[in-house]
Amino acid sequence: MTLIETEKTLDLAWQLCRKLKSDFPDLNTDGFEEKVDGLLQVKKDISEEQLFHQIILTAVERISAEEPQWTYAAACLYLEKLYHSSSQSRRLDPANPYRDFFNLIQELVEKKLYNPRLLEAYTRDEIQQLESLLNPSKDKLFTYIGIVTLAERYLTKSHDGNVYELPQERFMIIAMTLMMDEDKAHRLSLIKEAYWALSNLYMTVATPTLANAGKSYGQLSSCFIDTVEDDLRGIFDSNTDVSTLSKNGGGLGIYLGKVRSRGSDIKGFKGVGSGVIPWMKQLNNTAVSVDQLGQRQGAIAVYLDVWHKDIHSFLDVRLNNGDERQRTHDLFTGVCLPDLFMEAVEERDDWHLFDPHEVRKVMGYSLEDYYDENIGEGSFRKKYQECVNHPELSKKTVPAIDIFKRIMISQLETGTPFMFYRDTVNRQNANAHKGMIYCSNLCTEIAQNMSPTVLEQEKIEDGKIITYKHPGDYVVCNLASLSLARAVQHNVLSRTIKIAVRLLDNVIELNDIPVLQAQLTNQRYRGIGLGTFGWHHLLALKGLRWESDEAAEYCDELYEEIAFHTISASTDLAKEKGAYPYFNGSDWDNGNYFGNKGYEGPEWEALRQAVTTSGMRNGYLMAVAPNSSTSLIAGSTASIDPLFRHLYSEEKKDYKIPVTAPDLSADTKWYYKTAYHIDQHWSIKQNSRRQRHIDQGISFNLYVRNDIKAKELLLLHLDAWKSGLKTTYYVRSTSDSVIDECESCHS
């Protein structure tokens, strides 16, 4: 380095120190400048990039439970580095990095990083108007882990890794992309509103939308759910669809309950069926070999009914012992549980296992197509009993509690299987007039109608092979989440929900899903999943203990308010743009949805009348996803989970990032009781109140000690089922140092 370059670097170092003191006058910076000075004395020829890295690390080292504000100081320094990097790429002055927004879009379109539609949809004048809305001061809302996560994973970089896009520009590009097809008369005002919600961190969009909106590649939806038919072509076609969606960044839930069991007959030849495990091996290979945009391997959860003859081998597929030929370590598992099974577990009764193919052949119906419409009675238990009593139908009889023990052993070792309470889910399905729900998705928060795609005909016409398929309901999840701590505390919940629902509805129009039956399903139901994060953060700010009736009551009140505003926003959109195609005959249409939820009072009655008159834009509305990555970006606690630790570290390649509880202070720390010290029955009680208002599901984890007694874990599951939970996600045991997370659903 030349003397001039060295002086410039020294100059920059003291500029950063002065900025830190100016921006954070209450921060205890004693010793910080001395450490920076000592660093410069040792490394005389330090480069600008090395300088930033070392000064940032010096700030990061001071983040602690006693001095949590250092996370914002470190974020401020990291932003300066980001501004310098972006300005170098764009040939701008780092003192004013948010400039020439139009030129940025133009250059990234030319580099094939942005979608050309941005320049086709918006004029230069409109883009310049939107540039004037960019508010660099909003960058100061980020914590250190938040800005690092956003920059490393979501901001647009060139193919050789140079940073171009800045945080506020990412938010604006998302708003511009999702509002692209709105009426031009009010489009800019809608973009302004969407940018307001995103830049203030009142809401976040799901990982695929955050990463891919405005880009020339990737799709915007988070998760998909497929139902596999019991035939060879259906199984392999499903695998092709899985690989296609996985390649584009989607996570998947796969229902295999219709596939015949091991030892079933094929074309009358008895005992030759191989069961579901070999097909799961195929899916496991797909998950590993078809990665998601080169970032991580595919993420797939497979679900099976608890009455399926392969259930025992299914429950063992993720264990670390036994026959490796029967293991699928890269798949997640979920088990579908009817009320009747849970009753048998509680009463220590026997349970009977069947081959779904044999049931169809002998009984003339599919057992999985039924559920109990009412608690304690219904069609599933009648059909199940018919199967039990039929003399020509083979069955395997085992104690129900033995199956449940296998479930719990797997959960304590691997975190899975997830639990799907199929009767509860289907009783609350607002679109039961059009189908049923067999399972959930990769993160257990989606509950929408499902059905297999069936090959009807394949023939040659004019030298071409023409394939005709009857498209099934291939579920698509379009997700976003509200930041409860910020939106509630700033009293902007209604305003944020209104713009969030519109953004999500527009994702449906913009998405070009490469699996066509998913595209059709997306259009028919127009399903969205508006969720939340920051629940524990909000409780701490309000001074409410997690293990209290007050917290449970507040949960009930808050989520009823969220439900009211979300339904209102969707019916307002229906007035403007029309109802979803399957609205007629739904529980929205006949008003039963409101009665089933117990919604009363003049406001609810007025809303019910508005819905039955004007329709709903979206057949499915609310779902609470895990959203751990996006909640980190927004500086809050994940989903509806309790805080894991007051202070923990996120691992990076060459260093660790300390992360503290949000807004940690002498006042809030008493309300941040950590996950493994909380009585999980209180969490179930809260979630029962929450689930009443969520039309789909909730990613709900159970946090248990690794030495938990089997009886205690069983009681937790029975409590979850009796409390009306639709699903439970991971059983997170203290023996598990790392459990894989569903990144697609981070919203």
Image (tube, rainbow, N blue to C red):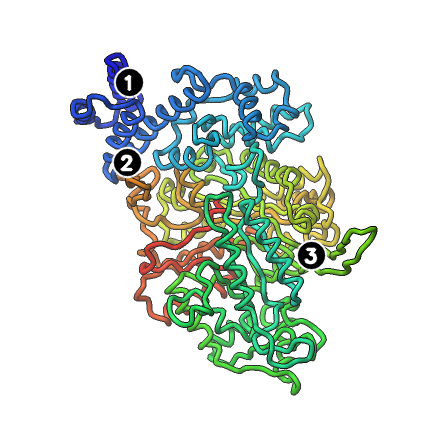
Residue 468 tag number: none
Q: Is 235 or 366 nearer to us in this picture?
A: 235
Q: Position of residue 397 (x, y in %)?
A: 53, 82
Q: Secondary structure at mark 3?
A: loop
Q: Give the residue at the far top of this rendering.
A: 4
Q: CA distance from mark 1 to mark 2?
A: 25 Å
Q: Secondary structure at mark 2?
A: loop
- The residue singled out by tag 1 in the image is 12
- Which amino acid does the dot numbered 3 rest on? Gly
Q: CA distance from mark 1 to mark 3?
A: 61 Å
Q: Is residue 241 above or below residue 272?
A: above
Badge 2 density bin: few <14, some 14–19, many ≥20, Cα 10 Å: many
Q: Specify whether 399 is left or right of 275.
A: left
Q: CA distance from mark 2 to mark 3?
A: 51 Å
- The residue singled out by tag 3 in the image is 472
Nearer mark to the viewer, of 1 and 2: 1
- Which amino acid does the dot numbered 1 rest on? Leu
Q: Is residue 589 above or below residue 16?
A: below
Evaluate whether residue 30 shows in this view. no
Q: Give the residue at the far right of this rendering.
A: 462
- Which amino acid does the dot numbered 2 rest on? Pro
Q: Is 533 or 234 nearer to us in this picture?
A: 234
Residue at figure coordinates x 69%, y 42% from the top left = 610
Badge 1 density bin: few <14, some 14–19, many ≥20, Cα 10 Å: some
Q: Position of residue 658 (x, y in %)?
A: 29, 40
- The residue singled out by tag 2 in the image is 68
Which callout, 1 or 2, points at the residue further toward the start of the chain? 1
Nearer mark to the viewer, of 2 and 3: 3
Which callout, 1 or 3, points at the residue further toward the start of the chain? 1
Picture quarter containing residue 448?
A: bottom right
Evaluate whether residue 161 shows in this view. yes
